[in-house]
Amino acid sequence: MQPIHVAAYIEELQQRIAAPSVKVKLAAIRMLFDWLVLGQIVPTNPASVVRGPKHVVKKGKTPILSADEARTLLDSIATQHRHASPRIVGLRDRAIIALLTYTFSRGGAAVKMRVEDVYTQSRRTWVRLHEKGGKRHEMPCHHKLETFLEEYIAAAGITDDPKGWLFRTTEGNSGYLTDRPMNRTDLYRVIRRRADDAGITTKIGCHTFRATGITEYLRNGGKLEIAQQMANHESARTTGLYDRRDDQLTLDEVERILI
């Protein structure tokens, strides 16, 4: 295997898939050959000198909500049903959406939480998130999130099950919680259903709340380096992709076109 073979493969890939995907595949090939070199199976890494396609991203594509829309979404989730089962589902959905918004959590980390991952420290409620790569990330709760989590846990009756899953699926359409965890597909369906009920037409997903929370934090005087820590990003550049404050500036300028 020579560098020219890897380069030809990468060039062919660029005709079929997007540049970010090509870069990921090239990185995988490099890691494979690094492992083979360490094992003395091949003398050199033929992919080390091959350059991937240029791909520069200065702004993320994730759709976000305004602060008013996010509040409307949370307020629209009914939690005062006469019957216990739909009330618990409402409390669960409000709690998990608030968690994504106020902690900048990924959807995958939220659904992996167990009851014991909500705990008290220094008289405040904290959450423990299990992020990708096996990283454990701890965050204090915003006062609204603290209330939403406490109300959900109490109504669900899971306080005495610390090892149990925090956000659980329902038994069919009954509205009763099971002992099984939600997955990311379940979470996406919850978000889409609640957005439709709130009259929000933006096609939002799990990452929307991460971007919304970071943008509003920065808009209200937060610092980028602190947002980076809160979002558990390795680089402030990655956090900057979620900063959508310039969107409002652009909209304000567009309105100056008085035709």
Image (spheres, rainbow, N blue to C red):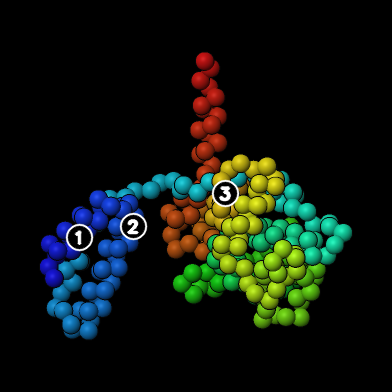
**How many C-alpha atoms fall within 10 Å of the one at disc 1: few (<14), some, or many (≥20)?**
few
Circle nearer the N terminus (1, 2): 1
* Helix, strand or loop at mark 1: helix
Residue depicted at x 43% and y 54%: 237
Q: CA distance from mark 2 to mark 3?
A: 23 Å
What is the x, y in percent for residue 37?
20, 79
Which amino acid lies under the numbered mark 3 shown in the image of this protein?
Ile
Q: Say which of 112 and 188 sits in front.
A: 188
Report whether 160 appears left or right of 207. right
Residue depicted at x 65% and y 74%: 180
Image disc number at residue 9 = 1
For mark 3, what is the residue?
A: 204
* Helix, strand or loop at mark 2: helix
Report whether 63 appears left or right of 81. left
Report whether 147 appears left or right of 168. right
Image disc number at residue 21 = 2
Circle nearer the N terminus (1, 3): 1
* Helix, strand or loop at mark 3: loop
Q: Say which of 244 and 13 sits in front.
A: 13
Outermost top residue:
259
